[in-house]
Image (cartoon, rainbow, N blue to C red):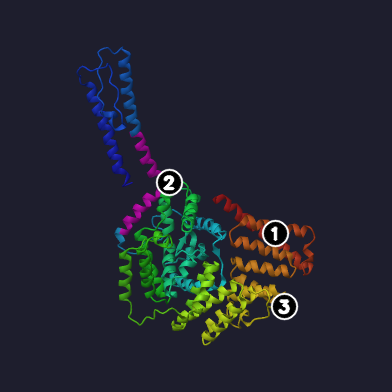
Amino acid sequence: MCSLFPRFIAAFVYTNAMNTVYQENAEKPVGPVRSPCRTFTRGWHHTAMTTPISCSNPAKPSCQRQKFKKKWLTALTLLVQATIIFVVFCSLLFNPALAQTAAGATEASVSGPGLPLLGDGSDMASNAERRLGDRIARELYHDPDYIDDPVLWDYVQGVWQPLLVAARQRGDLTAELDERFAWKILLGRDRTVNAFALPGGYLGLNLGLLAVVSSRDELASVLGHELSHVTQRHISRLVSKNNQQAPWMIGAMILGALAASKNAEAGKTLMVGGQALAAQSQLNFSRDMEREADRLGFGVMTQAGFEPIGFVTMFDKLQQASRLNDNGAYPYLRSHPLTTERIADMHSRLTLAAPRAIDKTPTALHAMMVARARVLSNPGVDALRGWQAQVDDLMLLTLPRAAQIGTLYGAAMAASRLRDTPLAQRHQQRLMTLVAPDAPMLQQVRWLGMEIGLAATDLPVGPSAAAQPVADEPLRRPALMLQAQMALKSGAPAALDKSAQNLQIWLAQQPQDALAWQWLSGVYGAQNQSLRALRAQAEVQVAQLDYAAALDRLKAAQDRVREGAGVGMGVGSSAAHIDASIIDTRRRQIEVLLREQTLDR
């Protein structure tokens, strides 16, 4: 309202002044002219300044036209005034965000420079933001670059979960948002250095960013920063600025921005029209929001036990990248503008922390995860062969132990993908020797050995201790997925039963794990339990928010029951009846979800 009011006053004064000038000039006598009635000069800004000509004979047609033009100009002036008043009235009546922003600013000036009110300046409810996030996440799940790698997922969760705990303890993450938002990280195969917060508690993390961070602390600084954007409702506050845009348009612009980071033409296709492109720029976080996310993210990561030096080193790394020519490899810098003020603020906070010796050398475990991210994000043949060249280089022996381990890990993965199983196994054996004293790294190398065995077509797969959960130890997701693959490849009934049991235990705690449901469906199919396999396929689609596809799977299961094939699924008829009842119940529940999803479109 404050920005519109001066414009309204200026326009109102201008139109009234022009009308007055016209009336005054109309009453003044003028000298002789060339024609009975002078025409208006060209240009809309000269129209009101044209001097009319008096007529001695009002009955003449030329003078009648002159009177008509005078009346037309008066009507046009009144129309402009009425339009301005109408626009101002509508902006006040239908834009409550203006009132909320003003109220928030007043309250902030009274209370001082403290934390902002949750959702301050936003008229989007948390459940509406979650629905918008679900709509975007549903598209990302079907993106070819989306990747669900259990090993990287397990490593990222080791950083992400402590940050969530710290945010709850600090009060940044309220109980309402904790319950309503998804709090999921979606990994992308994209090699660009980017991470982004989405509405509803979804976060995107490109493998390109994982490939450049030097430590868990740097990764924690990025995730803590994005987490603070979500907890402080920055996304909904930005969307509220565009509240005249439909929610689906906002979602399309966000998807277009993500697509533009990989392909500029694809991004422009999703963000059709200059108006959409201009509105998309408003979705970039403001500098105030960036500083706020820095401050809160710094507190969250330090309380979670990560070293604050990670924030500073990550900023230095991004600053160095920003000095280079922008070739599109760092889209993170476009949505998160890096300023010297932000960098100086983090350096000052680091000096205020308790002094202690900081080891900036990457850990061997982190080096392995960086190598894995690089292999998965760049699976080209030349890139995979480049890993072997690094291993053959004699300079490898002069590098730190962590760098040697990371290079051997990447070379073993690359050789396996090139179908050179003997070479991959040799690299894996060298890794076992290097990491032997460290149990967590030994586990990672064993999982790598299982992947090499599964990728080989000429090697028998037997039971592996790496795929068996240790007693009194929580189930690890990579081991469960590898165990399911080994059971399917061997076809042993005991292995299938054990895998199905462990996957059911895991899914009881993580019901939204689409990959676990997918492997469970395969295990059920190998056990000839067709109804359970179809139901698991439906749960895969539910976890990926595709309720229409889930209903198709459940209808297929019901058709199978009606055809009488359900009794042949390998268990008794009572079990088939129970499975059919579960399928009927799930179908009704998913139909409700599909109706709600359809209404949100």
Q: Is residue 3 left or right of residue 410?
A: left
Rate crowding at label 3 as few (under 14), some (14 to 19) or many (20 or more) other CA atoms within 10 Å: few
Circle 2/circle 3 CB separation < 8 Å: no
Return the disc, 2 or 3, that comes first in the chain's sequence: 2
The location of residue 404, given as percent across then percent down, is 48, 81
Residue identifier under label 3: 494
According to the picture, the residue beneath numbered tag 1 turns out to be 584
Residue 234 position (above or below residue 72): below
What kind of secondary structure does the magenta stretch mostly adopt?
Answer: helix
Q: Secondary structure at mark 2?
A: helix
Residue 528 seen: yes
**Is 65 within the magenta?**
no
- What residue range appears in magenta? 81-108
Q: Residue at x 40, y 44 (%)?
A: 93
Query: Whole-Å distance between the Cαs marked 1 and 2?
Result: 48 Å
Distance from Cα at disc 3 to Cα at disc 1: 30 Å
The residue singled out by tag 2 in the image is 274
Q: Secondary structure at mark 1?
A: helix
User: Foreground mark, 1 or 2?
Assistant: 2
Is residue 242 something one can see in this rendering? no
Which residue is farthest bottom? 437
Inspect the image, locate mark 1, and give the three-letter code of the amino acid beneath it.
Asp
